[in-house]
Image (tube, rainbow, N blue to C red):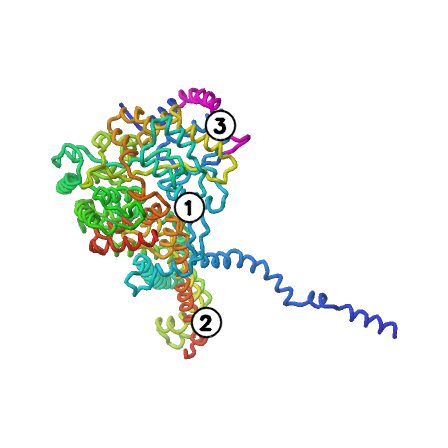
């Protein structure tokens, strides 16, 4: 790997794509013959998707769309929305019964309006059987009251990003796999003036990601199986105590961080350990910051007192609205996207940003081509659904959007409230939602 | 003759209700007002009414919800309740602080700037248009600029002060609750001052120079001139501009949302941003609507104060105020 800049990456991606495009079309034509769903005549699908992280992923996705159109005659219009805007738009569509036929959103989006989503149980069964079964978090996110209301297409893994040299200088071989060791590492990093830092502001992705790990790894959950609010527990207090000790080792200012703050600070060489997707690494490579790209690596979230991985990874479920005029075309498109011949190149193009929800795709070369990607392979398997141990419902989604537990931890860590007070506020907010 | 009288009587009989209505000025006026009334009803009264209605339901995004009476408001509670919604009342507090401090400073700075610009200064037209720039830049853009200025790692202010050797750690602009409040208020002031300054400047220029001449001949000091001529004549404009300013500040959303999203720990959540977070992001339309509706009494109060407080005719004309 000699000189490596954004342009050369783009060029490389383009030629790669051109080669595989004809292959895709051949596959699509053959696939269309044995379609599990016959699209309606002259059907058009309007699809609203989350705005890409990686250009190559988007390009590969559009190639799949194109092949689908050529093979079936179904026109697919894809529009993009940023993370924050997709939920309001989808909600308005659900509310008014007009708008995009399909929405590819985040987390538990379909659970905001489960009644408006097309039942795709047959499709999920078909895909699950064909591709080695769904990971548990995918089942939890995709189903509502025993029915599949969306197809989880991918997860976006967020893991520990760290500078190798700094961690070694702190006296560690790598990131310890347990919470106790992890705290020691962060303390040592702070001592060396190479601090860690996680977002503690209203950062929908990064903030919710590490706070849920913090709570869940200590066995603290917002709700139980019956949606009873159980945040007021000794486990929560333990998690808060641990969180505060961790926060004290952070670089100053994390209470104001949003989702992009840690990327900037890490790439500027001021932050030495944080939690993020693979985007920091990708940006370091794409922008020719060889020193950082070579010196950084990823590690899984440490396991806490609970004794097993407890992570919150972002799920991307794809739903079809009941009001669509072309339900079969929408199902056919979803099935087409997750066929191995389409999904594998797409996953590869995503370069580690996205992780499969179906076990058969574990062998995708993207996970082994660069050993720094490997951690992200298990994002789907290590995550709990967005609701933790409770049922994935619109209320669980609302609790995340409302930053209830992020605020609880921030309240305690920044010293605005004592542990009891912080928990009481969160409990009050949660009871408001789960009433 | 009889023939003529007969015809006139017939004509009189034909002037029916419709004929009279046709030439009725009030009836015509009604029709001229109708388009405006329709627009007001359709785009102001209806959404407002709908919003208030939503606050009495458990509407979620995607479902219309059922009437639940005052339940949403009960969950918000009163500030003296022990199980009140602390986040909501914090947002009320934040909104009041934000509005009062920002409006007061904006008024003081705006008036001062207007008085300065009213003096004879070189490049008058140029300076006046430059002053407008913060108002012209889209809020979201200026918010992003401020976001960088206030960044916890890359703030230009922290950087400069550090290089000058005045501080040795970055200033935690948006991470500390009170710093975050001050930073937001400063950004709001920066953005709002030109509006007030330019409007007051327009008001200043309507003051007749002869009044100033007369006052000068009587030997009035600068302060007396300002206190007894400029300020009283300016009050109608001040009333209007401050009403607008208070309304804009109270309902500010973009600046807060772009800079802090209500963080850290809800220290900068305004009622508008909290309403958005709960209604749109978390999907609980009813709760969000209740918070939005709770803004109405505060807004009415603000309008009353600035309107009736400054609109008293007698006071404006130098008479007694009782």
**Residue B210: which disc?**
2
Left or right: B208, with A179 as reference point: right
Tell me the crowding category of disc 1: few under 14, some 14 to 19, or many 20 or more residues within 10 angstroms, Cα based: some
N-term mark: 1 or 3: 3
Position of the N terminus of chain A, as image quadrant, is top left
Tell me the crowding category of disc 3: few under 14, some 14 to 19, or many 20 or more residues within 10 angstroms, Cα based: some
Q: From the image, state whether disc 1 or disc 2 is nearer to you.
A: 1
Instruction: Identify the subunit bearing mark 1.
Output: A
Residue B245 is at least partly visible in this image: no
Tell me the crowding category of disc 2: few under 14, some 14 to 19, or many 20 or more residues within 10 angstroms, Cα based: few
Element type where label 2 sits in the image: helix
Up/down of A41 relative to A99, above or below? above
The percent position of residue B232, horizontal first and vertical second, equals 41, 72
Q: Are marks 2 and 3 on the same chain?
A: no
Q: Where does label 3 land, which residue? A: A69
A195 or B146: nearer the viewer: A195
Q: Where does label 1 land, which residue? A: A88
Residue A153 is at least partly visible in this image: yes
Q: Is residue A30 magenta?
A: yes
Q: How far apart are marks 1 and 3 (CA)?
A: 28 Å
Q: Do labels 1 and 3 share a chain?
A: yes
Please tell me which residue is depicted at 36% across the width and 45% down the height of the picture. Answer: A393
CB under 8 Å between discs 2 and 3: no
Instruction: Identify the subunit bearing mark 2.
Output: B
Q: How far apart are marks 2 and 3 (CA)?
A: 79 Å
Please tell me which residue is depicted at 42% across the width and 29% down the height of the picture. Answer: A335
The percent position of residue A38, horizontal first and vertical second, equals 50, 28
């Amino acid at each position: 790997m000699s000189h490596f800049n954004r342009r050369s990456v783009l060029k490389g991606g383009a030629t790669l794509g051109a080669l595989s495009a004809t292959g895709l079309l051949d596959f699509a034509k053959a696939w269309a013959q044995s379609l599990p769903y016959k699209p309606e005549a002259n059907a058009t699908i309007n699809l609203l998707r989350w705005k890409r992280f990686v250009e190559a992923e988007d390009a590969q996705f559009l190639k799949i769309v194109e092949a689908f159109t050529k093979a079936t005659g179904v026109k697919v219009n894809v529009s993009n929305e940023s993370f924050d805007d997709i939920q309001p738009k989808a909600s308005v569509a659900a509310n008014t019964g007009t708008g995009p036929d399909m929405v590819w959103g985040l987390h538990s989006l379909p659970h905001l309006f489960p009644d408006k989503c097309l039942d795709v149980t047959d499709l999920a069964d078909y895909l699950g059987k064909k591709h080695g079964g769904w990971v548990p978090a995918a089942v939890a996110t995709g189903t509502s009251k025993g029915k599949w209301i969306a197809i989880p297409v991918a997860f976006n893994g967020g893991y520990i990003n760290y500078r190798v040299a700094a961690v070694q200088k702190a006296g560690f071989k790598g990131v310890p796999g347990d919470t106790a060791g992890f705290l020691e590492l962060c303390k040592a990093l702070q001592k060396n003036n190479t601090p860690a830092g996680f977002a503690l502001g209203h950062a929908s992705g990064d903030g919710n990601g590490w706070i849920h790990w913090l709570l869940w790894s200590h066995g603290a959950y917002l709700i139980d199986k019956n949606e009873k609010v159980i945040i007021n527990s000794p486990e929560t207090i333990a998690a808060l105590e641990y969180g505060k000790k961790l926060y004290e080792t952070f670089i100053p200012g994390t209470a104001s961080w949003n989702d992009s703050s840690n990327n900037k600070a890490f790439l500027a060489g001021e932050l030495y350990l944080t939690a993020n997707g693979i985007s920091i690494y990708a940006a370091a490579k794409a922008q020719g910051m060889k020193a950082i790209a070579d010196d950084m690596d990823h590690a899984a979230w440490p396991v806490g007192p609970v004794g097993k991985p407890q992570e919150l990874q972002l799920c991307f479920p794809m739903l079809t609205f009941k009001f669509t005029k072309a339900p079969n075309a929408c199902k056919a498109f979803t099935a087409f996207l997750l066929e191995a011949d389409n999904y594998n190149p797409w996953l590869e193009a995503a370069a580690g940003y996205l992780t499969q929800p179906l076990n058969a795709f574990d062998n995708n070369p993207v996970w082994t081509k660069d050993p720094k990607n490997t951690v992200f392979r298990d994002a789907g398997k290590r995550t709990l659904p967005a609701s933790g141990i409770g049922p994935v419902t619109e209320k669980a989604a609302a609790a995340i959007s409302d930053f209830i537990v992020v605020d609880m931890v921030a309240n305690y860590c920044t010293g605005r409230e004592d542990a009891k007070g912080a928990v009481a506020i969160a409990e009050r907010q949660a009871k408001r939602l789960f009433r | 003759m009889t023939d003529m009288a007969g015809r006139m009587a017939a004509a009189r009989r034909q002037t029916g209700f419709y004929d009279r209505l046709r030439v009725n000025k009030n009836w015509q006026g009604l029709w001229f007002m109708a388009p405006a009334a329709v627009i007001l009803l359709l785009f102001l009264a209806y959404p407002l009414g709908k919003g208030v209605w939503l606050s009495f339901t458990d509407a979620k995004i995607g479902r219309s919800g059922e009437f639940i009476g005052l339940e949403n408001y009960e969950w918000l509670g009163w500030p003296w309740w022990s199980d009140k919604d602390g986040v909501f009342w914090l947002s009320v507090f934040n909104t009041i602080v934000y509005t009062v401090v920002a409006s007061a400073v904006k008024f003081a700075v705006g008036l001062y700037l207007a008085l300065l610009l009213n003096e004879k200064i070189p490049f008058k037209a140029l300076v006046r248009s430059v002053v407008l720039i913060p108002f012209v830049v889209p809020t979201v853009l200026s918010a992003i600029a401020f976001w960088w200025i206030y960044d916890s790692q890359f703030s230009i202010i922290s950087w400069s002060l550090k290089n000058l050797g005045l501080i040795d750690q970055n200033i935690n602009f948006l991470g500390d609750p009170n710093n975050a409040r001050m930073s937001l208020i400063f950004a709001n002031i920066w953005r709002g001052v030109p509006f007030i300054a330019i409007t007051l400047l327009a008001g200043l220029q309507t003051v007749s120079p002869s009044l100033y001449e007369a006052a000068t001949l009587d030997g009035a000091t600068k302060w007396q001139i300002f206190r007894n001529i400029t300020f009283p004549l300016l009050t109608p404009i001040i009333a209007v501009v401050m009403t607008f300013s208070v309304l804009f500040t109270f309902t500010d959303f973009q600046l807060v949302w772009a800079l802090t999203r209500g963080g850290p720990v809800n220290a900068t959540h305004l009622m508008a941003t909290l309403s958005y977070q709960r209604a749109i992001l978390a999907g609980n339309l009813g709760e969000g609507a209740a918070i939005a509706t709770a803004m109405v009494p505060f807004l009415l109060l603000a309008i009353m104060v600035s309107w009736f407080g400054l609109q008293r005719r007698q006071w404006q004309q130098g008479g007694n105020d009782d």
